[in-house]
Amino acid sequence: MNREQALAIVKLNLTDHRYTHTLGVVDTAVELADRFGANREKVELAAVFHDYAKFRDKEEMKRLVEEKLSDKSCLGFGDELLHAPCGAYFVEHEVGLTDQEILNGIRYHTTGRPDMTLLEKIVFLADYIEPGRKFKGVEDVRKLAKKDLDEAIIQVLENTIAFLMKRRQLVFPDTLATYNQLITNKR
Ligand code: DGI
Ligand code: FE
Ligand code: FE
Ligand code: FE
């Protein structure tokens, strides 16, 4: 499947705003792939499909996790987490992509996980720094992403965890575990 075919499929599933975000993630992810030496075609497809399930019915996704996914850990930490693992499932079973590296890029794009692959790191980071993002502190992360992938991801995790805690929202354990691992690796 090429970029145009993939984009045509996701466009049907997203709002205009979310589609524009997706185009930004694709461009940013491909740029990061070239900078850090990842497989361009795989990164591109993972980026195109990363938010495929963003607008699926939340109750339908919870049922899907309960009935079809072996990893149910996302349940109970906020409905925003559902679209990542469910997106990977839908992209495999509705779109027909079977490449596990690509599917894992979709699956872990919201929370990260310890031992992320290069592709997973790139999709995770591109989602945060694509040109349409206006988060406080995003410009600092964009600068870090020019030279050090892990430092940039540590900063995304710090910002996201602080954002969640400010709002008294639950922090997914693997998000913290990702942070802890990257900090440990730096020492
Ligand atoms: O889908 P996007 O908006 O492009 O971005 P995303 O997939 O990174 O989702 C962002 C949302 O996910 C945002 O509302 C914060 C939430 N989120 C990210 N990490 C965690 C989290 N929510 C919880 N409860 N725990 C997390 O660790
Ligand atoms: Fe997302
Ligand atoms: Fe994200
Ligand atoms: Fe996104």
Image (cartoon, rainbow, N blue to C red):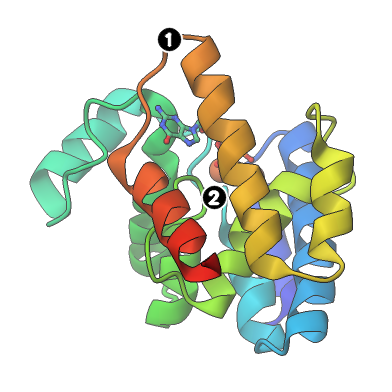
Q: Is residue 7 left or right of residue 119?
A: right
Foreground tag (1 vs 2): 1
Going by the numbered disc 1, the residue's amino acid type is Arg
Q: Which residue is mark 2?
A: 52
Q: Residue furthest top?
A: 167
Element on which disc 1 rests = loop
Residue 49: percent from left, percent from top: 58, 60
Element on which disc 2 rests = loop
Q: Is residue 55 above or below residue 126?
A: above
Q: Residues within 10 Å of mark 2 (few under 14, many from 20)?
A: many
Residue 88: percent from left, percent from top: 40, 59
Task: Look at the numbered discs 1 and 2 and tell me whether their residues touch, using CB distance below 8 Å.
Answer: no
Residue at 44 percent across and 76 percent down: it is 97
Q: Which residue is mark 1?
A: 168
Could you say which is closer to the camera, residue 121 or residue 12?
121
Residue at 51 percent across and 9 percent down: it is 167
Q: Is residue 50 left or right of residue 37?
A: left
The earlier-in-sequence mark between 1 and 2 is 2
Residue 25: percent from left, percent from top: 75, 56
